[in-house]
Image: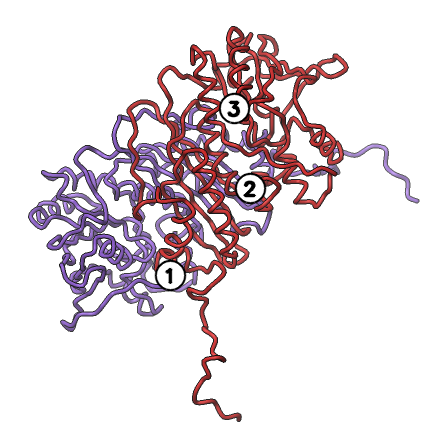
Chain colours: A purple, B red
């Protein structure tokens, strides 16, 4: 039997546990102990800014009385990084936009992470910094958070949930059931870029030109639209994410029991998106967007609202793409380039999984 | 070459896609299309009750002006079902308790699901029903939600995030920095049951007696405590989840720069928990609880607050377990059964991963 060494040369010693020097997430980062605290203090608080405040179970907000909007969205996009953005700004902008589409001005976000053991801290740090920057740019604070870690293979790198709270100004009444015959349907810009940006990197397909995500916050655009005379002239707002424009208008047609008539020739789809979609066999009107809004507005105010939208960068390409009709309630149709009408219907599932 | 059949006997026909008749989650359930809508209408809305209301991007709440608490927590517990509960009531009670420990009365919750393709709908249905029942029992509505689906192996069955909003009554000021020398430290009941319940089923260990989770909502108990004369007599509230009692008191000692002195003989740990912990090599004071609160209160009011706590089932076993001192700021010590003092310190990571 070989004699055991009595002393260990420090140069030969290897720490048996991946402790503070770790470059990767370990299970203990989700344990509520010292490692959790270090992750919050050294990674999340610097990334999110001082708004994170002292560690508490909840954040406290000063809210004026009235209607408050509350929303939640989990983000599981793969890959985490894609042209024009990453899962971090997507998670901030997406939840801001859900609030904006209720007519609310966002005041605070939460961030709940589910991390896979072994995730590189650099990746988490880059995502968190992007979230902090997106939130600061939007003027909305990330006020509280949570981190859980699951073992290797228990999750796919990083998922993040953002919930958001916003305040709905008096006089604003937005909801899918408010669509009514005669309404003009406006889209704030070009469609399909987010989904195509994800597909291009996921499948390694080179479409010639790089299509970047359109991820952007829309609450300032919405505030401007609601500031045009009578705020009740805006009946419905929807951000056409999963399921794209088609899912949005069909859901609204069903909720309000009205018909929707789109004019395909007027719907702005960039050439790069339409060629990528024809290559992949996708319908660009069903591809997700992350920085666009579809609005159903009183026709008496639609030109005025369009002008206000076009005066802002997020709405520079806004156009009227259709109208609400009393016929075929619950159904959307589109006038094709040939002048014929076709029914537009949602996918059963999805064209592109995990795009948000 | 074998001749191809011209007709297919319907009995031999198999649908190539797992459509409506599916018993399992498919990617399309997260796609924002028809399958998503069916999942919401047929599974989530019946489970959560009509409070879900019409499908919107956000839920609208009527909130009185003042301070609003906002919190988020993701739940990744494994297994999903354990003695006394499942991930569903854990996710509802856990977020209610985070709000309660800010002194807030909860008014609404969100539910964000991340599902693994192939998850049985029966499992999701049971979890959702449990969430709906827990929310109804607590008198708090689940008002909005989100579902994402990732491919097989991309997640471990089912994760759920709940965010919550609550209203903090006037005069209530609760926070870890409010602990001050002289405060009595109260715990609302017996410690360690949740963590041991999870371990017993996860590792298939038979401890003789079944230990069930203590998962329970605490907002009514907290309201009763705050109703005792001066609500500002309650300085700090904390639910000792991950990291258990030790993590809670150490964090509070650090936040307030005070010392904490616990009396081990007074800390209520059930015999079943202490024997299971000694078998597993765990410290019961660091095991997670899901239905207990630790309170730091003005000593002039502690007996009164104890009486009120003991008059309710959630606080029937409430006891004073220690006090706040001016010495050793940022540190917690415990008087042992031998009359000596020991330093209590948090784990670096966690004793038990994925217990919530």
Q: Residue at x 59, y 9 (%)?
A: B325
Q: Nearer the viewer, mark 2 or mark 3?
A: 3
Mark 1 Cα within 10 Å, few/some/many (few <14, many 20+)? many
Q: Nearer the viewer, mark 2 or mark 1?
A: 1
- Report which residue position mark 3 lands on: B238
Q: Tag 1, which chain?
A: A
Q: Residue at x 16, y 42 (%)?
A: A225
Q: Confirm whether circles 3 and 1 share one chain.
A: no
Left/right of residue A12 with respect to residue B254 in the rendered view: right
The answer, for residue A118, to whether it is visible in the render is no
The answer, for residue B260, to whether it is visible in the render is yes
Q: Quadrant of residue B284?
A: top right
- For this orientation, the residue located farthest to the right is A1
Q: Which one is nearer the viewer's eye here, B283 or A337?
A: B283
Residue A314 in the image: x percent, y percent? 22, 46
> Taking B74 as reference, is B328 above or below it?
above
Element class at badge 1:
loop
Q: Which one is nearer the viewer's eye here, A190 or B82?
A: B82
Q: On residue A350, which mark appears? A: 1
- For this orientation, the residue located farthest to the left is A300
Residue A6 in the image: x percent, y percent? 86, 33
Q: Quadrant of the N terminus of chain A?
A: top right
- Report which residue position mark 2 lands on: A149
Q: On residue B111, which mark appears? A: none
Q: CA distance from mark 3 to mark 1?
A: 43 Å
Mark 2 Cα within 10 Å, few/some/many (few <14, many 20+)? many
Q: Which one is nearer the viewer's eye here, B183 or B312?
A: B312
Q: Tag 3, which chain?
A: B
Q: Nearer the viewer, mark 3 or mark 1?
A: 3
> Taking A5 as reference, is A252 above or below it?
below
Left/right of residue A285 with respect to residue B34 in the rendered view: left
> Taking B92 as reference, is B335 above or below it?
above
């Amino acid at each position: 039997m070989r004699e055991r060494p009595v002393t260990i040369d420090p140069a030969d010693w290897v720490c048996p546990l991946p402790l503070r020097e770790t470059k990767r997430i370990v299970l203990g980062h989700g344990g509520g102990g010292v490692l959790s605290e270090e992750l919050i203090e050294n990674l999340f608080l610097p990334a999110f800014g001082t708004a994170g405040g002292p560690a508490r179970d909840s954040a406290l907000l000063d809210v004026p009385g009235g209607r408050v909007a509350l929303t939640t969205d989990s983000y599981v996009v793969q890959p985490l990084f894609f042209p024009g953005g990453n899962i971090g700004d997507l998670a901030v902008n997406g939840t801001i936009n859900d609030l904006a589409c209720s007519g609310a001005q966002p005041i605070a976000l939460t961030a709940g992470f589910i991390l896979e053991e072994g995730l590189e801290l650099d990746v988490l740090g880059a995502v968190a910094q992007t979230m902090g920057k997106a939130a600061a740019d939007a003027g909305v604070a990330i006020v509280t958070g949570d981190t859980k870690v699951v073992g290797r293979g228990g999750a796919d790198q990083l998922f993040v949930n953002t919930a958001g709270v916003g305040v709905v100004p008096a006089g604003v009444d937005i909801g899918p059931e408010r669509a009514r015959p005669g309404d003009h349907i406006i889209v704030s810009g070009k469609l399909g870029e987010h989904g195509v940006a994800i597909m291009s990197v996921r499948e390694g397909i080179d479409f010639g030109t790089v299509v970047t995500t359109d991820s952007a916050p829309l609450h300032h655009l919405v505030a401007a639209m609601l500031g045009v005379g009578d705020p009740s002239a805006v009946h419905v707002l929807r951000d056409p994410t999963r399921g794209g424009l088609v899912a949005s208008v069909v859901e609204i047609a069903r909720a309000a029991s009205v018909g929707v008539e789109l004019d395909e020739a007027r719907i702005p789809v960039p050439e790069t998106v339409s060629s990528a979609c024809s290559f992949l066999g996708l319908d660009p009107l069903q591809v997700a967007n992350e920085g666009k809004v579809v609005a159903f507005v009183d026709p008496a105010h639609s030109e005025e609202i369009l002008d206000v939208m076009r005066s802002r960068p997020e709405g520079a390409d806004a156009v009227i793409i259709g109208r609400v009709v009393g016929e075929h309630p619950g159904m959307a149709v589109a006038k094709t380039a040939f002048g014929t009408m076709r029914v537009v219907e949602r996918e059963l599932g999805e064209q592109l999984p995990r795009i948000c």
